[in-house]
Amino acid sequence: MANTTSGTTVFDKSFAIDEIIEEAYERIGMQGVSGNQLRMARRSLNIMFQEWGNRGLHYWEVANNNITLVADQATYTMFRSTGDGTSSTTAVYGVDDILEASYRNSNVDTPLTKINRSQYQALSNKTSTGTPSQYFVQRFIDKVTITLYLTPGSSEAGKFLNYYYVKRIQDVGDYTNATDVPYRFVPCMASGLAFYLAQKFKPQMVQQMKLLYEDELQRALAEDGSSSSTYISPKVYYPES
C-alpha cells in the first residue's frame, strides 16, 4: 500500500521565528540556545530583512492603492513605518518607494511620467493647476512623498491617483510569528541568519556560510517576479542606394 502525502502546503507559514532561529544556530553547530542568544538572533533577522531592501525589487511586497486628490494640493505623504497603531483613513504605512502611477477618472487611467529631482526643479511654474501628467517621488527616513505636476485643480478634486508601491518587509516580532516572506525565500532566510550568527559566534565559518547564503538568495531572487512573454525583433538596416 502506497504512503499518502500530507495534502498541505503551509510549511512556510507554520515555520515560526523560533524554528528559523533554531535552524540557523544548528547550521553553525550550536544547539539549546536561549535568552540573550535568541534576542541576538531575532535582531540579526530584522537587520537581514532590511538588507534585503538593497537587493532589488521584491515582487511579493508590491501593492496597489488610491489617493483621493485635493484641489490645489500637489504633494501627498506616505509613511515608511507602520504607524503608532492608531487607525487612519488617509495615511498609508510601510511604503518604501513608488513604482508607477496613473491619474484615474471614472475608472479610466492615464499613465503619469515619473521624473527626477532635476526635472522637477526645472519646471518653471510648479503651482500651475490642471490634470496631472508627471510625478516626483522623494524618499525620506520616515516618509515617502509624491508630488504631482500639474497640481490638481477644482476639476480634478475627488478624482484619484492610482499607484503601485513597494512595501517594507514586516518586522520579525514575536518568536511565534510567521515571517513576511514567501516560501521560496525560506531556505535563504535560514542560511542568511546562519551567516549573520557565524559572524558573532563562529568566525571560522563565516566564509562558508556567506557562500551558501548568497547562492540560495540569488536563486530565490531569480525566481521572484511574474512571467511574461518576451519578443525580440531584429534591427533592420537599409543600405544606401
Image (cartoon, rainbow, N blue to C red):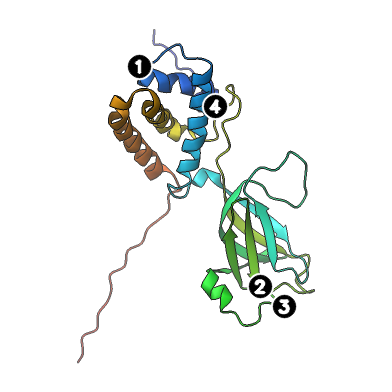
Q: Which residue is mark 4?
A: 13
Q: Which residue is mark 1?
A: 29
Task: Give percent across and percent down for residue 5.
Answer: 45, 17
In 3D space, how far apart are the residues under numbered discs 2 and 1 (Cα atoms)?
A: 58 Å
Q: What is the three-letter code of the residue carrying label 1?
A: Gly
The residue located at (56%, 44%) in the rendering is 168
Residue 182 position (above or below residue 204): below
Mark with earlier residue (4, 2): 4
Residue 82: which quarter of the image? Answer: top right
Residue 200 position (above or below residue 64): above
| Total numbered circles | 4
Q: Check disc 4 and report its element: helix, strand or loop.
A: helix
Is the N terminus in the top left, top right, bottom left or bottom right quadrant?
top left
The disc at residue 237 is none
Q: What is the three-letter code of the residue carrying label 2?
A: Pro
Q: Which residue is mark 2?
A: 132
Q: Nearer the viewer, mark 1 or mark 3?
A: 1
Q: Which residue is mark 3?
A: 129
In 3D space, how far apart are the residues under numbered discs 4 and 3 (Cα atoms)?
A: 48 Å
The residue located at (54%, 16%) in the rendering is 35
Query: Mark 2: few, some, or many residues within 10 Å (few <14, many ≥20)?
Result: many
Kindly indicate whether the residue at mark 3 contacts the one at mark 4 (C-beta within 8 angstroms). Answer: no
In 3D space, how far apart are the residues under numbered discs 1 and 3 (Cα atoms)?
A: 64 Å
Mark with earlier residue (4, 3): 4
Q: Check disc 3 and report its element: helix, strand or loop.
A: loop
Task: Give percent across and percent down for residue 190.
Answer: 42, 28
Residue 114 position (above or below residue 60): below
The residue located at (56%, 79%) in the rendering is 122
Query: Mark 1: few, some, or many residues within 10 Å (few <14, many ≥20)?
Result: few
Left of 222 or right of it: where is 182? right
